[in-house]
Amino acid sequence: MYFAALLARTEDGWEASDTELDDVETLSDLTDLAREASEEDTVLVLIEQEDAWFGVVRVDGEEDPRIYVSDAAAAARSSYGEILLTDELLGRDPGDDDADLDSLDLDGTEDGEPDDTHDSDDEDETVAGEAVSHSPVGDREILADLGVSEKELLALDEGDALSTIADALGAAEVLETVR
């Protein structure tokens, strides 16, 4: 089971609408859906899948979308997660299906920088023949200017992440109306 909603920032605050992703096949489709909600203002697409992972896609006007996914391995097992896990996000060359994900920096640390956030209980999973880390991927500062710091984003529990984000944005009530 999944839940997806659009939060569009307007002059009057945040407006929420639930959205079906059945017709969305690519990140471009998802971006177009967000832009339909508001062409000029910030739109957040919030997606969660069975409390296993969550994703945030931020579209600001005509800028390229910014993406954050809480657990790359869990999202890779989901058709909706696959939409968000672009080659660029995973550090692969477009069309390079044989990329060695074991060598990718999916945890957001710089090369040579120790990974202080890696939990020894987390292990990589093999999904579709490739090792994918259970680490978060994407823009960890996607919501920093909206009141959710990188540290707060990384600390979110998949079970209540979207509610926590909406609460920090002052949009908890409007999100709950579409949940």
Image (cartoon, rainbow, N blue to C red):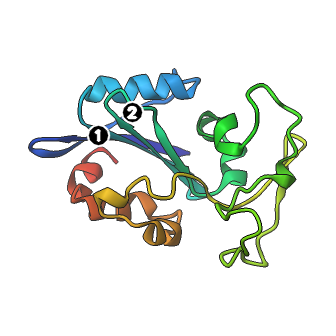
For the point 76% across and 38% down, which residue is it? 92
Amino acid marked by disc 1: Thr
Label 2 sits on a secondary structure element that is: loop
Label 1, on which residue?
42
For the point 77% across and 68% down, which residue is it? 112
For the point 62% across and 59% down, which residue is it? 136
Q: Which mark is residue 19?
A: 2
Query: Which of pointers 1 and 2 lies earlier in the amino acid sequence?
Result: 2
Label 1 sits on a secondary structure element that is: strand
Amino acid marked by disc 2: Thr
The N terminus - image quarter: top right
Between marks 1 and 2 in the image, the one whose residue lies nearer the viewer: 1
Q: Is residue 25 left or right of residue 122?
A: left
Q: CA distance from mark 1 to mark 2?
A: 17 Å
Res 44 quadrant in image: top left
Q: Are marks 1 and 2 in contact (CB under 8 Å)?
A: no
For the point 43% across and 52% down, which residue is it? 142
Percent coordinates x, y for residue 38 in the rendering: 25, 29
Percent coordinates x, y for residue 169 in the rendering: 26, 58
Q: Residue farthest to the left?
A: 12
Residue 66 drawn above or below residue 34 = below
| Residue neighbourhood size for the residue with mark 1, other residues' Cα within 10 Å, grouped as few (<14), some (14–19), many (≥20) | some
